[in-house]
Image: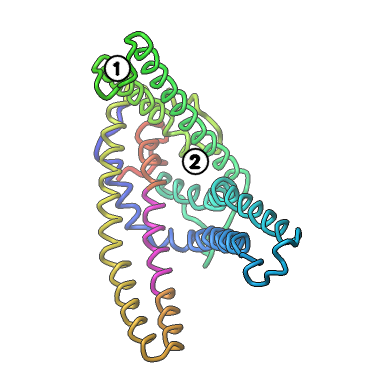
Amino acid sequence: MKTPVLRPPVEAVLFGFERIGMVIRIAWLPIVLSIGLYVASFCALVGGEVIGNVDWSAADPSLATDPSIALKSIVAHESFAQFYLLNSLVLPLLASLILSCVYVATTRASTLADYEPPSLPFYFALGPRELRYFVVRILYAILIIVTAVIFFGLIAGVVAAVIAVTGSIDAGANPLVIAPGAAVAIWLFIVWVWIVMRFLPVLPIAAVENRIAFGAAWKMTKGNFWRLVVSGLFFLALMQGIVTTLMLVIFVPAVLILGLVGAFAYSFAGAASVAVFALLAVVAIPAFIAIGSFALAAEAAFPARIYAYLSDCGEECKIY
């Protein structure tokens, strides 16, 4: 089967706008929980760095030879390293796990004609389907990263081999080094994109069919590579334009106006600025959640629409 080129990205964006109320309802709590994790960890990260950089001996010269001060500094820097690792590795995994329920519900809503998430003021579910989707998402990310590392290693190997053969290390002035390296880089990049796009339906398969099926995703996209590439590029360009426009129209003016009001209030009464910045949070956080929910919905709906066209789900799938 052949997938349309322009319809899936357009349908994904339309779904993001049409069902933004539903997505905000099911996404606000997971998004707030994810933001809370990062805020708490960031505060601990900054606190550990501040404590580690305190010059205790300057405050009290008698502490200059105190070994406990050096020990405190070492412990603080070790804590900073641990929190840095937490921010860069553990927290993205936890956030992805928390948001799995939103991705699953959004994928199913953008694919299945009769699916509707529970009508609750909040939605948070981490059952077998969500955990399976989380595992597939991690495996898909690992596949992308490992493939990229291998390809970059091959490019570096080709460049090193050409340098060894030509006896020149000045790659910037040696076309015999630049040309083979560039050719291999372009070819490997195309292969990498090919692998990424061929496995794209594995995410909606996990959400809709509740199974891990990389093989089925590979077979499903056979003969559709260039269609998927053009469709994906169009989707990225469309989303970039829409999100940037929304940020400029909604988020940035609110921040600028309230920032100016806060600065004006602070110049006359410092306490008044607290209320202004509280108002800033009240305006900015809902705007951020709304824009984030739209982007999340469209991001989940794009591979879902690809899946809908390439699978045999028939009338069960929404065809706009």
For the residue pair 41 and 175, the one nearer the viewer reads as: 175
Residue denoted by label 1: 177
Image quadrant where residue 178 sits: top left
Say what amino acid the circle numbered 1 marks.
Val
Q: Amino acid at mark 2?
A: Val
Q: Residue at x 63, y 54 (%)?
A: 77
Where residue 307 appears, as percent x and y from the top left, is 40, 36
- For residue 241, which numbered disc appears in the image? none
Q: Secondary structure at mark 2?
A: helix
Is residue 112 or residue 185 the one in the foreground?
185
Image marks 2 and 1: residues in contact by CB distance under 8 Å: no
**Residue 315 in view:** yes
Q: From what the image shows, is residue 1 above or below residue 67?
A: above
- In the displayed structure, would residue 285 be above or below residue 48? below
Dominant secondary structure of the residues highlighted in magenta in the image = helix
Q: Is residue 132 left or right of residue 171?
A: right
**Span highlighted in magenta in the image:** 283-298
Q: Nearer the viewer, residue 47 or 141?
A: 47
Q: Residue at x 25, y 40 (%)?
A: 234
- Report which residue position mark 2 lands on: 208
Q: Residues within 10 Å of mark 2 (few under 14, many from 20)?
A: some
Task: For label 1, count other residues whose C-alpha is less than 10 Å away and answer few (under 14), some (14-19) or many (20+).
Answer: many
Is residue 292 one of those drawn in magenta? yes
Which element type, helix, strand or loop, lies under badge 1? helix
How is the rendered protein coloured? rainbow
Residue 314 point in image, percent of width and height = 39, 36
Image coordinates of residue 63 in percent, x first then y, are 72, 66
> Which residue occupies 64% across, 72% down?
59
Magenta-colored stretch includes residue 282: no
